[in-house]
Amino acid sequence: MVLIREFRVLLPMTVEEYKIGQLYSVAETSKEVTGGGDGVEVLENKPYTRQKRGPSGEMVEESGQYTYKKYHLEHKVPGFIRALAPKGSLEVDEEAYNAYPYCCTVIKNPGYMKDKMELRIETWHIQDDGKQENVHQLPPEKLKDRDVQVIDIANDHISSSDYKESEDPSKFKSEKTGRGPLGKDWKETTKPLMCCYKLVTFNFQWWGLQRRVESFVMRQERRLFTLFHRQVFCSIDRYHGMTMEDIRAIEDQTKAELDKGRCEGEVRGFSAAKDKDES
């Protein structure tokens, strides 16, 4: 069975602002979670053009930026997975096709799970209030299995171990844009307003572990989306006004830092050990 969940993340910014902010925050987050043997290895980052099937079955051309990364996760999965996983199996490959405002990310474990594990995240970034019912144009048989969850970056619960005052939208005020702090009803009163419609499809085939892993992955996806987008908004003054040329330069510099940092220091950043339901 394939698990389908749609997360809708509302943000007080324009779609064009988010295009820069997302890439800036990905680079910063990659550095924060890399060290002690774990972390992100960027293998490719280049423009692409590909043929893909459109919603009506027709073939269409898609162009954007392709990235291929390897994630080293030895210390970032729950203990019950580490205990069962063969050595070297805790590495996953990520291929991302960024044809903004549409993006598709596919995560696999080709070295061990092969075609028995695939996590696919498809995102539409739209200048609206997050109430479109079928942005991803799912057919009826998938639509009935889809679970929709709305993420409020200012008011959703954050664990004490994840909380950072500097990344709290309910306290942050942007000097460059004047936006924030975000109150209880900010989604009804704040302009501009956009939504990231994130369709997460997870296929995992491992008898005896399937349900536990599915539950763990979806909890972690929600947690990751919440923390990441809190960071995107609260760091807006750092990237507001940047160009794509500025972002590509940052990405090149970040790749060099990741290659060096991954082999040094202690394990850093986003860890499954913080998840109270890991076992």
Image (spheres, grey):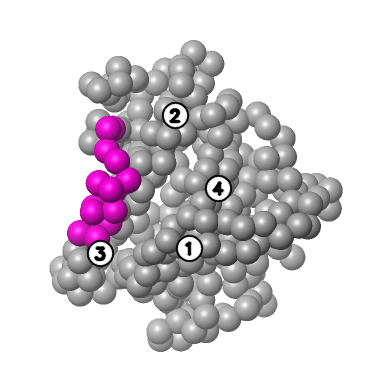
Lower position in the chain sequence, tag 4 or tag 2? 2
Which disc, if any, is residue 48?
A: 1
Q: Are marks 3 and 2 in contact (CB under 8 Å)?
A: no
**The stretch drawn in magenta includes residue 242:** yes
| Mark 4 element type | strand
Q: Position of residue 21 (x, y in %)?
A: 35, 40
Calculate the distance from the C-alpha at mark 2 to the C-alpha at mark 1.
25 Å
* Residue that mark 3 sits on: 255
Q: Residue at x 39, y 21 (%)?
A: 182
Calculate the distance from the C-alpha at mark 4 to the C-alpha at mark 2.
15 Å
Calculate the distance from the C-alpha at mark 3 to the C-alpha at mark 4.
24 Å
Q: Amino acid at mark 1?
A: Tyr
Q: Amino acid at mark 2?
A: Thr
Calculate the distance from the C-alpha at mark 4 to the C-alpha at mark 1.
14 Å
Q: Are marks 3 and 1 in contact (CB under 8 Å)?
A: no
Q: Are marks 4 and 1 in contact (CB under 8 Å)?
A: no
- Stretch of the chain drawn in magenta: 240-255
Q: Residue 265 appears in which quarter of the rendering?
A: bottom left
Which disc, if any, is residue 102?
A: 4
Q: Amino acid at mark 3?
A: Lys
The vertical placement of 109 against 99, above or below, is: below
Q: Amino acid at mark 4?
A: Tyr
The answer to whether residue 273 is left or right of residue 106 is left
Lower position in the chain sequence, tag 4 or tag 1? 1
Lower position in the chain sequence, tag 3 or tag 2? 2
Q: Residue at x 38, y 44 (%)?
A: 22
Calculate the distance from the C-alpha at mark 3 to the C-alpha at mark 2.
28 Å
Q: Position of residue 228 (x, y in %)?
A: 39, 44
**The stretch drawn in magenta includes residue 95:** no
* Residue that mark 2 sits on: 14
Lower position in the chain sequence, tag 2 or tag 1? 2
Q: Are marks 4 and 2 in contact (CB under 8 Å)?
A: no
